[in-house]
Each structure stands twice: as C-alpha cells, then as structure tokens.
Amino acid sequence: MRPHEIFASMTPEHAEAVFRRLAKESPAMFLQAVHAAAIALKSRPQFLMKQPMERRTSAVRRALARVSSAAVAEEILAVYFLECRRDVLVEWLDLIGLAHDEGALEVASPPSPPAAELEKHVAAYRAKDDDLDRELLLQAFAAQNSIDWPDLEALLHK
C-alpha cells in the first residue's frame, strides 16, 4: 500500500483523530497538510482553515488520498509518528531490532528480518492493544520508499 492509499482507506473518524493530534502536537505540519489539500482541491488555504475541524480534516484526507499527493502523504505519516506517536514507533523498531535514534532509523534502507521472525513480531505488535495507530504505523512503515519488505506487505493484507 502506498502512502496515498493509506489515507484513502482510513476511516473518517481515524483520520480526524490523527489530524487533531497532528494539529495539536505539530501545528506546522498540519498547516502544511491544509495547504497541500487546498492546492489539490483548488481552494484557498484560508477557506479550509475557517472550516470546522471535521470538514477540514475530511478535505485533507481526500486530498492526501490522491496519487499526486503521495510524497506529502508519506511526509505527514512520518511526522505524525516521529512527533505525535513516537511511543508506538519506537516500540515497533525495538521489537524488530532496528537501530534508531528516537525513532529515526540509523540505516536508510534496512534489510527485512526473516519472514517467520517478521510474522511473529507483527502478530505480537498487533496483539498488544486495539490502538488503531498500531496498524497505521505498520502500513506507514511498509509504505516508506526506503523500506522494501515484501513479507511485511503480505502480512498487512492478512
């Protein structure tokens, strides 16, 4: 799944929760998302900023679900997990044994763990609780340009 497809498949409720948290904890990135949405939807950013949060987040989600927004969608997902949900990101990276500095990978394109080991780690990560951001993190991690892990992609479709 590519970054824009992640936003296309996200429920409106989950998208609103993500964007509300992003607006609170990383307002500059949220503003960038609104500007990107305004460009994609051919409207003015000021118009979107004056909309109620529910309508604003809906517009941003629709814009980020477009193929042309894949790069921005990838950046927003990365910032969301690095700045807003570092806890679930660090937990995942520690679980699979990837070296990182507070969630930032130390190796640009890390090799995938063996398939059986990866399957065990994904199952353990998913089983911890029912936080929707856990699945979102797995999708966002697999969607990064620097991650080429077909086994992870296959597990996400189970």
Image (cartoon, rainbow, N blue to C red):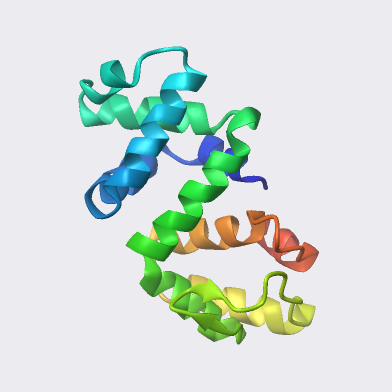
Image-based side of 9 in relation to 149, left or right: left
The one of 125 and 15 positioned closer to us in this rendering: 15
Any part of residue 13 in sight: no
Image-based side of 146 in relation to 15, left or right: right
Image-based side of 35 in relation to 111, left or right: left
The one of 35 and 84 positioned closer to us in this rendering: 35
The one of 49 and 139 positioned closer to us in this rendering: 49
The residue under the point 34% across, 41% down is 30
Residue 94: x %, y % from top left: 52, 85
Rendered view: 49 above or below 144: above
Residue 81: x %, y % from top left: 43, 61
Residue 38: x %, y % from top left: 41, 21
The residue under the point 64% across, 81% down is 120
Picture quadrant of residue 131: bottom left
The residue under the point 31% across, 49% down is 22
The C terminus appears in which quarter of the rendering?
bottom right
Any part of residue 53 in sight: yes
Residue 145: x %, y % from top left: 70, 55
